[in-house]
Image: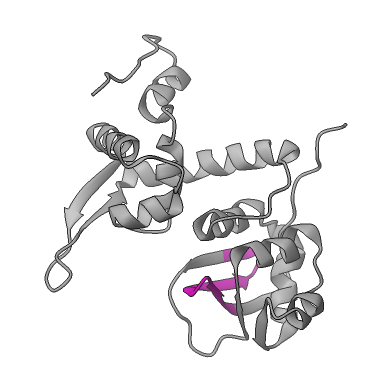
């Protein structure tokens, strides 16, 4: 196994790159930000990372104290990876990088579930949701998430929520098109790409409160 490359620089930023600067490392952190995952789940979220490279990144991040590996009790009895409390502190770093890079983000016809959910937390603007008080059930590629907008805050995490104001079922790519590219909800419904039950205004509150930064000048 190749030794991890170090910058041998006393700067804190250089040390951060020593810890999470290798290829795929920060994306592993991204994949674990919403909760523990098995190796196979990580492979699904990072399909272009080879199993050997992914295993190496996991070992390095575990050695650095960014994540830990634990075995679930029976009947599951499978191993999962999860971020440590220190590792969870990287979310603002990911958000800052996401906001910065979004100014030159190329168009894409695909986005993974966890990437999209974290983008909502990143691009949410409290001042645009000051008057909203809604609960949403988002089901993206059959993965349920509960979202609550209230008093200028957005809480979104895995799980189901009974009595949601609205339930949205679609792919993350379709909902990203609605949120970030202005795809009309009615068009997505007419094309059979989105199922919406409940109050459409609840989804509208989310769309209104999430915006991308201004793109870089051409």
User: Which corner quadrant holds the C terminus?
Assistant: top right
Give the quadrant of residue 63: top left
Q: Residue at x 53, y 41 (%)?
A: 94
Give how far across and how far down residue 16 sits, in percent. 42, 25
Front in this rendered view, residue 43 or 29: 43
Image: 151 above or below 4: below
Q: Is residue 212 left or right of residue 71?
A: right
Q: Is residue 30 left or right of residue 124?
A: left
Q: Residue at x 44, y 18 (%)?
A: 14
Q: Residue furthest left?
A: 74
User: Which corner quadrant holds the N terminus?
Assistant: top left
Give how far across and how far down residue 116 sits, in percent. 58, 57
**Residue 203 inside the magenta-drawn segment:** no
Whether residue 152 is visible, yes or no, is no
Give the magenta part as a residue range. 136-154
Is the magenta region chiefly helix, strand or loop?
strand
Give the quadrant of residue 164: bottom right
Q: Residue at x 27, y 51 (%)?
A: 81
Give how far across and how far down residue 13 sits, in percent. 47, 21
Give the quadrant of residue 195: bottom right
Whether residue 28 is visible, yes or no, is yes
Q: Residue at x 52, y 70 (%)?
A: 141
Q: How many marks?
A: 0
Image: 213 above or below 35: above
Identify the colour scheme used: one colour
Give how far across and how far down residue 95 sits, in percent. 57, 44
Image: 216 above or below 171: above
């Amino acid at each position: 196994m190749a030794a991890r490359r170090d910058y041998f620089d006393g700067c804190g930023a250089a040390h951060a790159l020593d810890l999470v600067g290798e290829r795929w490392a920060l994306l592993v952190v991204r994949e674990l930000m919403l909760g523990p995952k098995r190796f196979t789940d990580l492979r699904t979220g990072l399909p272009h990372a080879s199993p050997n490279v992914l295993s190496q990144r996991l070992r390095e991040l575990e050695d650095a104290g960014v994540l830990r590996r634990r075995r679930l009790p029976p009947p599951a009895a499978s191993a999962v990876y999860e971020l440590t409390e220190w590792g969870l502190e990287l979310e603002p770093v990911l958000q800052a990088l996401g906001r910065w890079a979004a100014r030159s983000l190329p168009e894409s016809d695909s986005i993974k579930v966890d990437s999209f959910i974290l983008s909502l937390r990143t691009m949410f603007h409290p001042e645009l949701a000051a008057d909203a008080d809604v609960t949403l059930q988002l089901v993206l590629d059959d993965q349920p998430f509960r979202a609550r907008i209230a008093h200028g805050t957005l809480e979104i995490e895995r799980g189901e929520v009974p009595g949601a104001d609205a339930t949205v079922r679609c792919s993350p790519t379709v909902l990203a098109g609605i949120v970030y590219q202005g795809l009309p909800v009615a068009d997505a419904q007419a094309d059979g790409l989105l199922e919406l039950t409940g109050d459409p205004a609840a989804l509208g509150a989310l769309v209104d409160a999430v915006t991308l930064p201004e793109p870089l000048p051409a």
